[in-house]
Amino acid sequence: MIEFLQVLILGICLGFVYALMVSGLTLIFGVMRIVNLAHPILIICGAFVSYWLFILIGLDPILSIPIAGLVVAALGVVIYKLIFERNAAQQTYSEMTVLLTFGTAMVIDGILSFVFHNTQRTTSPSYATDAIFIGDIFIPLAQLYSGLVSSVIIVGLAVFLKYSDFGIAIRATSQNRTSAELVGVNVKFVCLISFGIGCALAGAAGALVSFIFSFFPSRHWEWIAIMMSLVVLGGMGSLKGAVIGAIVLSVVSSMVGAFISPAWSTMVFFLSLFLILIIRPKGLFGIQSD
Amino acid sequence: MVSNQTELIMLGVMKILKEKGSFLLNNKKIIPFLILIVLTGLPIIQFFGNYNYLIHIVLFSFLYITMSSSWNIIGGYGGFISLGHNVFFGIGAYFSGFIFVRYGISPFITALIAGLVAALFGFVVGFITLRVKGPSYIISSIALLMIFRILFDRWELIGGTHGMTLPHNTFPVEWSKIPHYYALLLLMVLSIYLSWYIRHSKFGLALRSISHDEIKSAVTGINVKIIKVTAYALSAYFIGAAGAIWGDYLTYVRPNIFFIILIAANMVLMCILGGKGTVTGPIIGTIVMIFFNEFILAYFGATELNIFFTGFLMIITLMYFPEGIVGSLKKRKLLPGFLDWG
């Protein structure tokens, strides 16, 4: 029972980090119908920003979240201007856009691998190896802090989307682009800013990832399928769905890893991705595509 | 006076060449036939020295032309962009490799059976996956690849992550590549023929109509499901067979060689660069890509920059000429006839 609770808590903490990792992905899909396969490599960009800040000036990865977010958001806006702007204009849900994001992922992966090489890196703040005990349950501080920070950011994002004027404009655009334009929303600007926010979330997630996982540029190929499985289970384009999908799958995969074999824990993501896409492509809470 | 005469003769020859040249360029059969003869005879140069690098590049092109032409059947004609098609490549390699290691039967004998296994497998997978379309299909194909990577990594019978080491042939070094050369040449010719045949058959017409609109195709009386799945299985066949030969060529089969997404990305890019949905597109795309890659390797060394340039080329192609080289030339009516196979 203790072991079960232990795995459950770790799974939930990790689930919130996963939720932060995919929140940007699902936001971008909601507004522009772009399935951004370059999202995982943007997370790794954020992790690199955090890593170098930690190595060079000793800045704590949690404190470097805003910087990582801003840097990756700037990168995202540049990518958006160069590549996706004309695709976003027509809101097509096409295969070609997916391949375009795939090409972007390859380009960034190539540059990062060339400059930094594919060695495993991780930041090591003082709490990275620490843990606290509640009764007999052992909770590593790194997981706990990253889970808490992620949940704060996600709640902030949800509040922003729900109550701020700009958040309402984003939700209006994702519901119906033409109607949003009719009532006076500057859809082009909304798209640009939501892409920026999505990338900023990727950067923030990268800062957290830098101390709970070891990362290297080519790792994003594996993350593509993992992150897709999280958003597809909850339904593409829905923030609530992404959070629920991330927590459910993270807990299940932790359980499989703890009680069956660590080797099969990632299989949970891939198998659920495959099955959900075949059985119910729009997921549990997904918005209608097309 | 003499020079004047030679000049006149030269001009005459040029004129004839120009007329005959355009005839040559526009005839659909002569140039491909000549190329085939040259390729068949190419290994003769091994009598004059060791040209293993050239042979390697040519047979590598054969491999990828086979794969991208096969991918084109489902990805180009059918409109199902698969980023996990090298699953069949791996299955073919593992099937033949396993038989070679266990029973000593050479992959050259079992390659066509390996293709059959891959096709059978494609038939089953196609029944499950081809019901979704668009981006969902792309992502499900990536998921399929990841599932296979983990399965083959964990399957101890076939060596797990270490894979299997195959015995290699005992020919002298100049001749050791020649069997693979001819096997892949044969597979390439057959796969191009299959692609051409499908492009001009009623089956291919149905497939292309499905790629535009499945519901309307079904209304006109096309059995959508069977056509899709059969096309998927056909496109798996030669990829599986080529995988068997390629496993023997490398002398080892290992999950991290065969089940990586970059192979699928290369197939897709070669096909799109040349022009998807055309018969000659994948051929041209593959040749351009392989020369481009070798050029990058020669100038920048074997680094990750290759991934960068592949991605860059993909973006440029998709943004500025999504119909690919053959498609764009055809649209502007600049395509020489010998490349215009439909």
Image: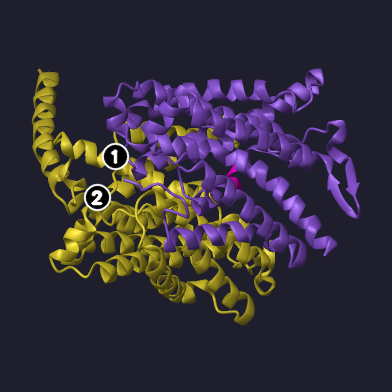
Provide residue A174's location: percent of width, then percent of height: 39, 35
**Residue at which label 1 appears:** B324
Provide residue B98's location: percent of width, then percent of height: 59, 74
Q: Does residue A220 appear to the left or right of A76 in the view shown?
A: right
Q: Is A52 rendered above or below residue A151?
A: above
Q: Which chain carries label 2?
A: B
Badge 1 density bin: few <14, some 14–19, many ≥20, Cα 10 Å:
many
Q: Nearer the viewer, residue A246 or B297?
A: A246
Q: Helix, strand, or loop for circle 2?
A: loop
| Rendered colour, chain B | yellow
Residue B57 seen in the figure: yes
How many marks can you see? 2
The answer to whether the residues at label 2 and label 1 have Cβ atoms under 8 Å apart is: yes
Residue B205 seen in the figure: no
Q: Is A5 rendered above or below residue B321?
A: below
Q: Indicate whether residue A91 is drawn in magenta.
A: no
**Residue at which label 2 appears:** B278
Q: Which residue does the image show at 28% across and 31% down from the upper left?
A: A179
Q: Mark 1 lies on which chain?
A: B
Which residue type does callout 2 highlight?
Thr
Magenta residues?
Answer: A220-224
Q: Which residue does the image show at 51% across and 33% down from the upper left?
A: A107
Could you tell which of marks 2 and 1 lies nearer the N-terminus?
Answer: 2
| Rendered colour, chain A | purple
Q: Does residue A230 appear to the left or right of A144 in the view shown?
A: left
Q: Which of B223 and B6 is in front in this view?
A: B223
Which residue type does callout 1 highlight?
Gly
Q: Which of A154 and B242 is in front in this view?
A: A154
Provide residue B189's location: percent of width, then percent of height: 32, 61
Quadrant housing residue B324: top left
Q: Distance between the residues labelled 2 and 1?
A: 10 Å
